[in-house]
Amino acid sequence: MTASLKVLTANDLAGGQVVFRSGTGWSDRYADAWIFEDAAAADAALDAARAATLTLADPYLIDVAAVDGLPVPTSYRERIRALGPTIHPDMGPQAEGGALVRALQQAQGAARSSGRLGLIRRK
Amino acid sequence: MLIRLENDRFDAVEDRFAPVGEDEALPETGAVILSLSRFQADGAALLAAGRDVGVRIAPADRVEELVCDLPRLALVALDFPKYRDGRAYSSAVLLRERFGFDGEVRAVGDVLIDQAWNMVRCGFDAFETTVGPNAWAAAARRYRHVYQASADDRPPAFVERRQAAARRLAPQDG
Amino acid sequence: MFQYDAIDRAMVADRNAEFRDQVGRRLTGELTEDQFKPLRLMNGLYLQLHSYMLRVAIPYGALTSAKMRALAHVARRWDKGYGHFTTRQNIQFHWIRLSDTPDVLDYLATAELHAIQTSGNCIRNTTSDPFAGAAAEEVDDPRVWSEVIRQWSTFHPEFTYLPRKFKIAVTASPQDRTAARAHDIGLVVRRNREGRLGFEVIVGGGMGRTPYIGATIREHLPAEHLLSYLTAILRVYNRFGRRDNLYKARIKILVASLGAAEFGRLVDEAWDGMDRPRADLPDVELARIRASFGLVDFRTLPPRSERFEAARADKAFARFARNNIVPHKIPGYGIVQVSLKGIGEVPGDCSADQMDALADLAERYGHGEIRVTHEQNLVLPHVALDDAPAVHEGLAAMGLATPNINLVSDMIACPGLDYCALANARAIPIAQAISETFADPDRAEAVGELKIKISGCINACGHHHVGHIGILGVDKKGEEFYQLTLGGSGAEDAAIGHVLGPALAADRVADAIDKLVDAYLAIRQPQERFLDTYRRTGVGPFKAAVYQDAHQA
């Protein structure tokens, strides 16, 4: 059984934008997010983020899973948070486009359903 | 630090009151602050002995229970376990406006400088805080005008406007 | 229109200076986030899913052209070129930086705008009738009383740290356009049998997890005692409202647990013990406030406008006039409602360009006034019928002429999971899908009045409990599902809706609404709105229409 993969996220305190713990620091691109495979390392990083009270607000860990080799948050809430408002594809990090953004946009929820609204409205 | 408001001045003062824990023995002499329940048990004796007694009111306590004793109390301490628990503001206003208490009304607990103006307006005149008196005074005076009457004596905006209008209409002294 | 004087401006300036100082202390660490958060909220700044959101107050929904232009400037300079009008007549900017907020507030102050008490556990924006000063049937101008309450509630030192948020609405017409009975305090302005002005005082209404229609604790409070009585209510709430459980902290819970009679008795006791003359507003101040709202320079016009009548030969204008223009108390004038519910658009959103265009139209044709409704639309309250065709043309050029007021596509939708950290599901795409299902304006008119209200979570900011059809987003096993309710109303016939059946997957909602509408059209009697038919038949035919052949996957 594989350990669950995690990503550490927060909001930038002064700016408010969503940020992810990257290999070198913090980035507002989900693509830069460091994938924690080790729970202890993830928790240690979370503790450090909680201590960074002058730069970060509300850090927390999210679960991600590999989908076609790309790390996708398992929760639809976290996918929207990593992308931007679904009704404005030109706003937020999703505007960058690319394979990872598409993977998040097209990901399905945990339960089965008989078709669903695409996560992005197509005009 | 204890800050007292007197004659529109904020000063750091010595606290002559000793808080007495629920099960603690009462000190033989000196001013004391008791919880409401402790006061209801032991307060009468202390007052009869001429001691200066203060009562500490928790947010859920009703200040009405002190009404008969207020004339003889030196102090009421109103607790803010968390600064956003605003019940003590109503307690302070009731003490001043409804029950005419003119002893010390002290804010204790989680007392932030950001509440200075609320507290002063609600009739608090003593503040247990880590903030210095000058900073506290500046925060308490931050708002040059107020919209509504409260337990302090600041005239609300509509009184200020009327006073200004009356001054404009007053005959000039020749 | 109420004008701030030097005192009002000083209040805002002092508040802004205080908040600038608090932001500085947060960024240096002198204030922790726990300490800062309540202070930040009391200045209208939320940390949401993607960013900070700033909620700017629009007291009782009343804007001028100058204020609208200022909002457009904020949208352009500090946000992404748009704003969102809310169910409490305020406006939200979704992309504001904390570090910019003191500058944004200083700029807003130059237009006499602010974000004071638009969030936090304090008294919020007092909302009122968007037709105030224009509606023929109003007993008195409710903006007068809303302004009285605004001043009394702003920086009220005793009520800054309540158990929870507190919302007051004031209505003065037989038709309630404010959802007063769903507020913590609803005030209905009336005259008693002797002709004296006063208020029916309703307390304990509210949405959220446990919706209530408020209870009347006083049939007729004399108008001159408004502030002392409100003080008594707030004092009882501040003292005895629950603080142990966030979800049981509103006044509606206190009123329900005590019963309205006992609650009213506690209020009377507090009121009796008060120095009322000191708390109540002097007549001279009331007169000053009242005078500022009576200053519209209406033209003297014949009741019938030939230009207006001629323009109705154009089908588009005729449809607009039919659905969006309402009679005005002044002959020759109309109340023009501006829909922010374009087909397929985001309900309640308005671009900076649209805001500027509205400011221009209001200035040229509308006596400079614009109102916000609690249903996320706008109103030009004073438009001469002669000018209505030109106004329509100006609106149409900006995509603001959708002729759907009160129709099925005129929905309320909260921002939902697209923006809000509290949401369980998205609301806007649901609204867009329903809107497109009913894009045909002929069909929408045939259906008639149908108020759909959509909330992305149980906090009910979309007011789904009082929708004729309510839609509540829920998270069901990691997917967005939607629970429908029927029969709610936020008007003078206030009621909480009833659950229709099991929650539906997102892609089935628009179709379900379609089926509900078809069911209504099949069985309605003359003059019956959707709500009326439901009240006559009950849930049966509607439940069958949606669930008869449905098996959830």
Image (cartoon, helix red, strand yellow):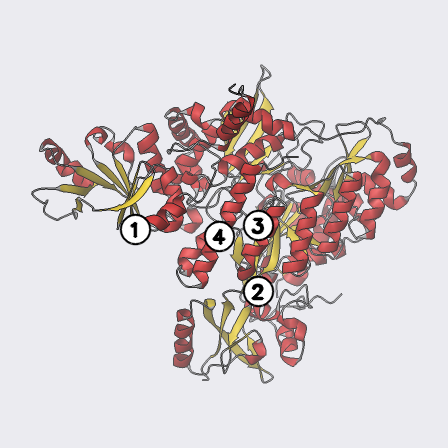
Query: Between marks 3 and 1, how big is the CA–CA gap?
Result: 39 Å
Q: Do the dots labelled 1 and 2 sit on one chain?
A: no
User: What label sits on residue C461 in the rendered view?
Assistant: 3
For mark 3, give the secondary structure.
loop
Residue A84 image point, x, y percent? 62, 67
Observer-side mark, 2 or 4, equals: 4
Pointer 2 with pointer 4, Cβ within 8 A: no
Nearest the eye: C248 or C141: C141
Query: Residue at label 4?
Result: C19
Residue B135, above or below C288: below
Query: Between marks 2 and 3, how big is the CA–CA gap?
Result: 19 Å
Query: Between marks 3 and 4, how big is the CA–CA gap?
Result: 26 Å
Q: Amino acid at mark 4?
A: Phe
User: What label sits on residue B129 in the rendered view?
Assistant: 1
Q: Quadrant of residue C277?
A: top left
**Residue furthest out toward the front:** B174
For mark 2, give the secondary structure.
loop
**Residue furthest out toward the left:** B28
Query: Residue at label 2?
Result: C50
Compared across the picture, whether B28 is left or right of A57 comes to left
Query: The numbered mark 4 sits on a residue in which chain?
Result: C
Query: Between marks 4 and 1, how big is the CA–CA gap?
Result: 21 Å
Query: The numbered mark 3 sits on a residue in which chain?
Result: C
Packing grade of label 3 (10 A; few <14, some 14-19, many >=20) is: many
For mark 1, give the secondary structure.
loop
Residue A56, above or below C352: below
